[in-house]
Amino acid sequence: MELKSLKIGKYEIKYPIIQGGMGLGISWNKLAGNVSLNGGLGVISSVGTGYYEHRAHITKELNSKPYDSVNFYSRNGFKAIIDNARKICGDKPLAANIMCASNDYARIVKDACEHGINIIISGAGLPTNLPELTKGFADVALVPIVSSAKALKIICKRWYERYNRLPDAVVLEGPLSGGHQGFTYEQCLDPNYQLENLIKPVVDEASKWAEVGGNPIPVVAAGGIWDHDDIAKVIGLGASGVQMGTRFIGTHECDAADGFKEVLLNAKKEDIKLIKSPVGYPARGIQTNLLDLVEKKAGPKIQCISNCVAPCQRGKEAKQVGYCIADRLYDAVSGNKETGLFFSGANGYRLNEIISVKELMKKLVYGENS
């Protein structure tokens, strides 16, 4: 199948392939910049930017108006990541993934707009007030992440009635994605909730609102998509493009340490599981030493110095589950195999080589043997 370009707001993406935002630090400037450079849409994760370049960007902020999570989210770190991505991709479209669950959500959205991000992709909750937070930045395209037609309807109704605005596109994430799921544990395993069964209802709902607003709302399918054949399949089912995360970890430009990539390269199918998370939803990751320690109630000390996401309630949920998600994700991106939390999509075990973003994009656009 020949892949057509993807239009999101005023921005045209050469290939309908969005690299999923992966935090903490998996998709920062090197990965996102190179994906955009090579015709896809690179997405910077806004999670944990205080850790960028070994916390080099937080000292200037510690005495500013206090934010509890200033050590975790850094405005200066976020700006540095965006600036460094721009050095790679120039004026090509560049996106940021911003979680609704972030304690600094409003601040991060405003910072993304001021720092020159073109497209904001937002999930981990319903971004019902995103148009309000981006007021004054009309050129910034807004893309909510949903897991059902019902969720899309709620967002569109709220946006249209309150802000006379509708999404510029929507990401539909199925239950095979890496990291946190928008489904219960049971739904993740229920055939009725698999991506291929969700596409048509969401496309139909998007089409209804597109008629209301007078502009198309393309649906981007995500979760378990691995190769050109998968892309062709979901486009055949009505999607306009795809979002892919885990496959991009297998690139030289991925911002994660080599140790992270080695964990994925060595993973077997049975190693990738749904696990409990302090966020309150199941998450998909790789069974590693950390989870073995947690099962024995011998995990690393939980300090909650980050106060990163609202559902965790200052470490309360972390203590119940047995690990701090911020600290353990930072260990993972740093390549610490002993105490790192390694997220992966359901197909992560299929990764068998590390290649360049340019080569991967070629395989995705034209097929594995191109």
Image (cartoon, rainbow, N blue to C red):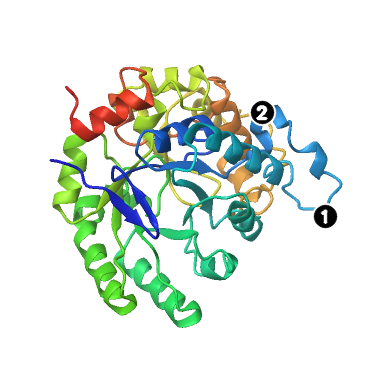
- Residue positioned 67% across, 45% down in the render: 73
Element at label 2:
helix
Category of crowding for the residue at label 2, using alpha-carbon neighbours closer than 10 angstroms: few (below 14), some (14–19), many (at least 20): few
Q: Nearer the viewer, residue 135 or 187?
A: 135
Q: Nearer the viewer, residue 260 or 37?
A: 37
Question: Compared with residue 3, is residue 263 higher up or lower down, i.e. above or below?
Answer: above
Label 2 and label 1: CA atoms lie apart by: 23 Å
Q: Is residue 236 left or right of residue 208?
A: left
Where residue 183 appears, x then y in whole percent? Answer: 37, 54
Q: Is residue 183 left or right of residue 126?
A: left
Q: Is residue 190 visible?
A: no
Quadrant, the N terminus: top left
Where residue 143 appears, x then y in whole percent? Answer: 42, 58
Query: Residue 308 — which label?
Result: none
Question: Which amino acid is tagged 1?
Answer: Lys
Q: Is residue 312 left or right of residue 138?
A: right
Query: Residue 53 — which label?
Result: 2
Quadrant, the C terminus: top left
- Residue positioned 38% across, 31% down in the render: 248
Category of crowding for the residue at label 1, using alpha-carbon neighbours closer than 10 angstroms: few (below 14), some (14–19), many (at least 20): few
Residue identified by numbered label 1:
65
Question: Compared with residue 360, is residue 106 higher up or lower down, i.e. above or below?
Answer: below
Q: Quadrant of residue 336?
A: top right
Q: Residue furthest front?
A: 91
